[in-house]
């Protein structure tokens, strides 16, 4: 049976619920889901809905306790919360009998059954000396030499930690969480991409390469008028990762047609209403009028409903 892990806080309750719902809907077999939450009581109403899903075997929600990890570098004034660091010390919250666990960011939507692809990755990891399977985000060349120098990397690869398959028994046997906390202290002043930097500095290229469709970044930008994802990519992608600060629940994000995968999942359970989060009201209003006057609104599904939901969210 496959095991999945999420780490998030109250600000990501809705996003995580949409992610988990999409995962359950597309899973062929029953699955176990583990959550480490900053305030687990705030997720109770969503947990009650998750418990009803036919593909859920077990849901375990744990309250994060800041005993080992009490410092969260570079969190202030960013789009990232302290919960991203919880995945450094996740082992203390999970049953010791688990063999493998798949960590998933809360800004990921599942669009196809992951069962077979993840089992293949697990089988490959079993045969490997490595502890994790992740996707390389970039190769360090002259343009990225700063990353290698900053983190003192010996290899030329940098991975994205949004999806991570872990050999849990090896993780525990090698006290990886303890070593990661040491690494966090060691590179504290050099951290830019949060715990992902810590993980890369520690593993330094020693990992299995993850199937790219298990962590497929659509790269939302403000310049896309069409979803240019190829037919083959649409057929193969499994986990869509909305990485970066450009999110599909912001007004500018929704104006990008690639946000549809997230919003479609949300609409299924919310009477076709959009999920919209505004961090700066005036900017959101500007983005909305920009979308209307440039006719980008015509590429949005249910444009009238979008305008209504957007204005309501701004006024509230």
Image: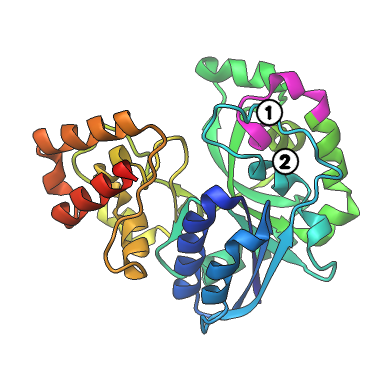
Secondary structure state at the residue bearing disc 1 = loop
Instruction: Name the residue that disc number 1 marks.
Output: 155
**Spot occupied by residue 21 in the image (x, y as percentages of width and height):** 47, 68
Pick whichever, 68 or 91, lies toward us: 68
Pick whichever, 135 or 288, lies toward us: 288
**Cβ atoms under marks 2 and 1 closer than 8 Å:** yes
- Residue 126 falls within the magenta-colored stretch: no
| Residue 294 seen from this side | no
| Residue at figure coordinates x 30%, y 41% from the top left | 251
| Residue at figure coordinates x 64%, y 32% from the top left | 194
Q: Compute the Cα span from label 2 to label 1.
A: 9 Å
Q: Main secondary structure of the magenta part?
A: helix
Please say if 114 is above or below 242.
Answer: below
Secondary structure state at the residue bearing disc 2 = loop
**Spot occupied by residue 12 in the image (x, y as percentages of width and height):** 53, 51
**Spot occupied by residue 138 in the image (x, y as percentages of width and height):** 52, 32
Q: Is residue 41 left or right of residue 152?
A: left
Q: Is residue 53 left or right of residue 99?
A: left
Please say if 17 is above or below 219.
Answer: below
Crowd class of label 2 (few under 14; some 14 to 19; many from 20; radius 10 Å): some
Segment colored magenta: 185-197
Please say if 67 is above or below 31.
Answer: above
């Amino acid at each position: 049976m496959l095991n999945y892990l999420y780490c998030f806080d109250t600000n990501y309750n809705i996003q995580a619920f949409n992610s988990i719902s999409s995962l359950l809907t597309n899973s062929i077999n029953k699955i176990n889901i583990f959550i480490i939450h900053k305030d687990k009581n705030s997720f109770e109403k969503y947990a009650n809905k998750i418990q009803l899903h036919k593909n859920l075997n077990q849901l375990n929600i744990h309250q994060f306790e800041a005993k080992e990890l009490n410092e969260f570098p570079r969190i202030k004034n960013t789009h990232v919360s302290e919960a991203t660091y919880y995945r450094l010390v996740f082992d203390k919250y999970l049953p010791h009998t688990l063999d493998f666990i798949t960590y998933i960011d809360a800004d990921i939507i599942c669009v196809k059954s992951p069962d077979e692809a993840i089992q293949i990755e697990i089988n490959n990891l079993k045969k490997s000396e490595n502890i994790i399977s992740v996707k390389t985000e970039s190769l360090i060349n002259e343009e990225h030499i700063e990353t290698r120098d900053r983190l003192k990397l010996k290899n030329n690869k940098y991975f994205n930690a949004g999806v991570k398959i872990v050999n849990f028994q090896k993780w525990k046997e090698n006290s990886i969480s303890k070593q990661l906390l040491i690494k966090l202290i060691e590179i504290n002043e050099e951290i830019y991409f949060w715990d992902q930097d810590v993980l890369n500095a520690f593993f330094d290229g020693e990992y299995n390469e993850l199937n790219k469709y298990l962590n497929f970044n659509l790269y939302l930008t403000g310049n896309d008028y069409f979803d240019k994802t190829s037919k083959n990519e649409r057929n193969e992608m499994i986990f869509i990762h909305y990485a970066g600060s450009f999110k599909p629940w912001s007004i500018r994000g929704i104006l990008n047609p690639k946000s549809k995968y997230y919003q479609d999942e949300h609409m299924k359970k919310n009477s076709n209403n959009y999920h919209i989060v505004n961090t700066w009201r005036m900017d959101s209003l500007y983005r909305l009028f920009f979308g209307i006057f440039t006719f980008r609104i015509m590429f949005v599904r249910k444009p009238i409903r979008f305008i209504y939901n957007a204005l309501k969210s701004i006024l509230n």
